DNA sequence: GTCGATCATCGAATCGCTTCGACGATGTGC
DNA sequence: GCACATCGTCGAAGCGATTCGATGATCGAC
């Protein structure tokens, strides 16, 4: 493995000059710059990450903490993680994967050993044990989701309140007078996961605003549970004509259950989903939906992190716009 | 941040002694050992990852290359990734997440900069561009899946050939005389992804062995495609009584399609799935299945990697046993 | 033509750890 | 009681980059 000294010798310059060519932190004559770059290429030089980290006090690695709990749609997590990796690479950083099972210790470790420069935490709960740790760590961090006390932290998420509201707005405009929200499993609400409660709040408030009758139904992500909720809904609210589903794996089963109950979508019932566009497009019928822009959140989270690393000021809270796309599952009545 | 020198001073020993206490590479009197450990705790010392990597030529990080292509069930990838992280931590290593979009360059980079000590590659194809690169890299690596030319590489995977065969064995024993395999999307076969073709081979061979009529049907992971394949199957093979599904997202739609076509499972039709147990258990009816032990594969992959890092010999190929669990979706006829 | 500012480059110190050889102090065998 | 291993610890030399101050060259202004 070639080292910087080899490059320097090959190019007839000092090692520091090579370093400056690479970092651009001092001006270098174009001629020597080219010569150095040439040597780098010829020798196939790649700087040693450890040495670099030691000398510069920067590892160019960010940690990504992914949830491994139940009740959260895995493909969304994965899309998000992927977009973080891609965005990080665009900023010349790599991503270290951390899971929850090490608990808060993982954060302490990667921060304490200077293994990473910054941290992204997904699926933040209202009262999250990681939040105080992040505060004391003094490494830059970005949270996906909003804890109850977000003071001094940088948070980003889809605007779930607006998402919940947008669904109701749409249904209300179409003339629906009773709507229901089929949501995440009960344990997700019990954990106080922000996105679930915020959706509910937006949904409920908007319904009140429109004078529309509304109810909320947490639901396990199983086909059986979907059937149970649907039959309960139809029994208790015969006047129900609008349904919002915010629970990805349930979308198929819920549609099936309505179909089996003899309710056709969108003729008898309008359905709006909060889910990735891809899912909404592939359903039958294609679903009117508010999309979850995982890629966008990932990209922006990394952007915020890089800004913080650069010492630039960033907003405490970033809400990603909720956009409703009308497809074939909603109809006016 | 405390450094090793601070610990040494606090404990009244030389820095090297602290290092040896930590690494255990030389014997230390129990008494000084305790003293050093105490100082470490008091000062909250954590070794600097970069410095360690520079001096020891080991970063204690392994790279995990995850696929981002379509046609592969995301939750399985995620479970696998998670188990790799957990297993790696048990060996005192961290996991760097690499996606495909950097192509082969990512591998070259993390290896060339000594950012990682070893590499795990998921979803290896028969003719995979990463394989030659891994060979030239001379970092220890483990592949999940088998490329066409696996010479000198360490590979591990579920024994999909046995899995495909086990399904047919089971159905044949139950007296079924015509079976069909609903498999991955066509593009997965086209890519020559090993697991798909191996399942097919096992399926076909076993059928021949049992004198059972068999056909294979690649299928997109959409509800519409499932319905199409099912009606095609029923039309062309009226004597069909056994179906194997090897395509996770399709399981629900396929069951629904049969139901809608008036075929009841398991009365009219026996269905075996190749999928994670969790999925099989939650289906209605619960599916007889060959499970995909993602956790087991991850754990063993890391085990192999650590053995290679330690210089121990490891087998070139490791096949994880395919175990069929009988549930409610198969019946003798 | 001289002086100070600017520019391009160099050399040396530094980052925090591991590891190797050295060296007293003990232990062992005869 | 002596020679020789063995054991526990120390000190110093790297590991391969970055960065800061210094230095000679170049330049414009007067």
Image (cartoon, coloured by chain):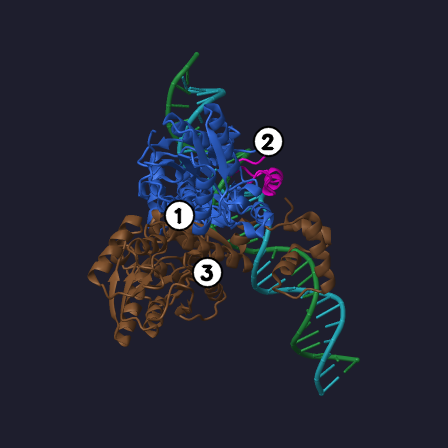
Chain colours: A blue, B brown, C cyan, D green
- Look at the numbered disc 3 and give the secondary structure of its residue: helix
Determine the CA span between mark 1 and mark 2.
40 Å
Image check: B199 left or right of B300?
left
Disc 1 is attached to a residue of which chain?
A
- Look at the numbered disc 2 and give the secondary structure of its residue: loop
* Front residue of this view, candidates A226 and A162: A226
- Look at the numbered disc 1 and give the secondary structure of its residue: helix
Is B304 in the magenta? no
Q: Could you tell me which quadrant the N terminus of chain B lies in?
A: top right
Disc 2 is attached to a residue of which chain?
A
Disc 3 is attached to a residue of which chain?
B
x 44%, y 54%: residue = B63
Q: Image height check: is B113 above or below C9?
A: below
The picture places residue A44, in percent across and down from the top left corner, at 36, 50
- Mark number displayed over residue A151: 2
Image check: A266 left or right of A309?
left
* Front residue of this view, candidates A192 and A302: A192
- Mark number displayed over residue B298: 3
Where does the magenta region start and end? A125-150
């Amino acid at each position: 493995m070639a080292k910087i000294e080899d490059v320097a010798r090959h190019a007839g310059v000092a090692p520091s000059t090579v370093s400056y060519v690479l970092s651009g932190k001092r001006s270098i004559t174009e001629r020597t710059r080219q010569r150095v770059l040439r040597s780098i290429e010829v020798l196939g030089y790649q700087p040693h990450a450890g040495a670099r980290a030691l000398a510069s006090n920067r590892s160019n690695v960010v940690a990504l903490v992914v949830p491994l709990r139940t009740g959260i749609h895995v493909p969304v997590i994965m899309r998000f993680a992927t977009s973080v990796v891609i965005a990080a690479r665009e900023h010349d950083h790599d991503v270290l994967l951390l899971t929850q099972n090490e608990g808060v210790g993982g954060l302490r470790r990667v921060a304490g050993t200077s293994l990473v420069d910054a941290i992204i935490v997904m699926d933040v709960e209202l009262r999250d044990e990681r939040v105080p740790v992040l505060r004391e760590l003094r490494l830059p961090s970005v949270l996906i989701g909003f804890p109850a006390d977000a003071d001094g932290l940088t948070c980003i998420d889809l605007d779930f309140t607006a998402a919940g509201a947008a669904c109701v707005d749409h249904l209300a405009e179409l003339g629906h007078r009773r709507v229901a929200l089929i949501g995440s499993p009960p344990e997700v609400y019990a954990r106080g996961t922000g996105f679930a409660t915020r959706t509910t709040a937006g949904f409920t408030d908007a319904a009140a605003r429109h004078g529309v009758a509304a109810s909320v139904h947490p639901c396990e992500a199983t086909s059986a549970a979907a059937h149970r909720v649907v039959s309960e809904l139809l029994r208790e609210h015969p006047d129900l004509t609008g349904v919002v589903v915010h629970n990805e794996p349930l979308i198929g089963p819920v549609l099936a259950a309505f179909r089996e109950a003899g309710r056709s979508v969108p003729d008898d019932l309008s359905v709006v989903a909060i889910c990735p566009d891809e899912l909404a497009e592939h359903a039958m019928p294609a679903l009117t939906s508010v999309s979850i822009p995982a890629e966008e959140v990932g990209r922006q989270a990394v952007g915020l992190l890089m800004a913080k690393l650069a010492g630039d000021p960033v907003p405490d809270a970033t809400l990603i716009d909720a956009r409703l796309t009308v497809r074939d599952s909603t109809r006016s009545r």
